Image: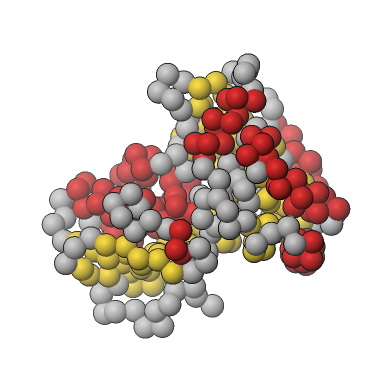
């Protein structure tokens, strides 16, 4: 069943779907002079989606529907709107477009919902205007928009370096099943990094060996080994800002999750399950314990942003 509220798209419209993500590992290096931290992260795209519908308009605009839609900015700060303008500028397009966002990924939840919107908007506007931008063009625009946008564009499983925007595909076998404890209260990524800096006064340079067991687990399709290797340097900072996150972490562990971790900068808690049915059981445990505003289940890896209807 589609998330999009349009049963019949207008004659000229494009709908694109892009996935949210979970950081299987997130290792944070020292803050650089530009204010950003270097990171090494392993992304997995999961089947929780944003959808963007591009339609003709006299002026650029954006609207949103779905869970937490009222928390989505609809002014020029909106990342999808910035993506549309970036495509128009790169391709020399004078026309405008309206973007309607259908929210499925938690807002400010550490699962890259805004980045998925931006990636979907890049693909939607390229198709809508027929600009024929190359994959490299889209990836370049994505990196300019945000650290997670390139991964939202390509999906599957990948290692991200730099700010997370420099991607290397990762070999992964099989399907992994997840339950997510979602909080309607968001966490600012900048605030979490600031808290991380306060907690970790001596941050070691990033190495190459820490995630070898995780990469081996992905290659083998070994969910138990992957669960044991999940890691997030930002987890303690997210808990510092939101101590209530200890509750869903504990509930997932008690429910037999193979591994449990705060996703990205939080506050979404991601629990790796043994199977699709076990993911439903972990989600039910979240609900029964009252430790989440919403629960989601998903599988991964899945592809990145792609056209699902329209031109």
Q: Nearer the viewer, residue 19 or 180?
A: 180
Q: Residue at x 42, y 58 (%)?
A: 72
**Is 276 on the left-hand or right-hand side of 311?**
right
Q: How is the image coloured?
A: secondary structure
Q: In x, y percent, where is residue 236?
A: 68, 35
**Is 279 on the left-hand or right-hand side of 164?**
right
Q: In x, y percent, where is residue 146?
A: 41, 41
Q: In x, y percent, where is residue 195?
A: 59, 31
| Quadrant of the drawing holding the C terminus | bottom left
Q: Nearer the viewer, residue 250 or 208?
A: 250
Q: In x, y percent, where is residue 193?
A: 55, 32
Q: Residue at x 34, y 39 (%)?
A: 144
**Is 101 on the left-hand or right-hand side of 81?**
right
The answer to whether residue 25 of the structure is visible from this angle is no
Q: How many marks?
A: 0
| Quadrant of the drawing holding the N terminus | bottom right
Q: Residue at x 38, y 56 (%)?
A: 73
């Amino acid at each position: 069943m589609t998330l999009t509220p349009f049963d019949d798209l207008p004659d000229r419209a494009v709908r694109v779907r892009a996935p949210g993500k979970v950081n299987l590992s997130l290792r944070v290096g020292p803050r650089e002079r530009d204010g950003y931290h270097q990171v090494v992260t392993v992304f997995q795209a999961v089947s929780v989606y944003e959808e963007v519908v591009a339609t003709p308009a006299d002026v650029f605009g954006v609207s949103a529907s779905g869970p937490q839609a009222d928390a989505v900015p609809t002014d020029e700060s909106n990342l999808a709107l910035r993506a549309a303008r970036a495509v128009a500028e790169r391709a020399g397009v004078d026309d405008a477009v309206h973007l309607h966002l259908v929210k499925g990924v938690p807002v400010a939840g550490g699962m890259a919902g805004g980045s998925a919107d931006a990636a979907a908007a890049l693909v939607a506007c390229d198709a809508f205007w027929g600009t024929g931008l190359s994959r490299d063009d889209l990836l370049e625009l994505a990196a300019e928009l945000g650290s997670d946008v390139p991964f939202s564009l390509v999906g599957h499983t990948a290692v991200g370096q730099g700010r997370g925007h420099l991607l290397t595909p990762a070999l992964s076998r099989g399907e992994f099943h997840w339950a997510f404890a979602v909080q309607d209260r968001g966490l600012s990524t900048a605030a979490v990094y600031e808290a991380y800096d306060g907690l970790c006064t001596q941050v070691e340079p990033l190495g190459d060996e820490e995630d070898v067991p995780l990469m081996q687990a992905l290659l083998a399709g070994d969910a138990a080994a992957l669960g044991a290797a999940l890691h997030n340097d930002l987890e303690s900072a997210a808990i510092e800002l939101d101590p209530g996150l200890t509750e869903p972490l504990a509930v997932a562990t008690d429910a037999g999750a193979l591994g449990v971790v705060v996703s990205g900068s939080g506050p979404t808690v991601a629990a790796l399950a043994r199977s699709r049915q076990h993911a439903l059981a972990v989600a039910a445990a979240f609900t029964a314990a009252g430790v989440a505003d919403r629960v989601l289940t998903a599988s991964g890896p899945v592809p990145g942003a792609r056209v699902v209807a329209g031109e």
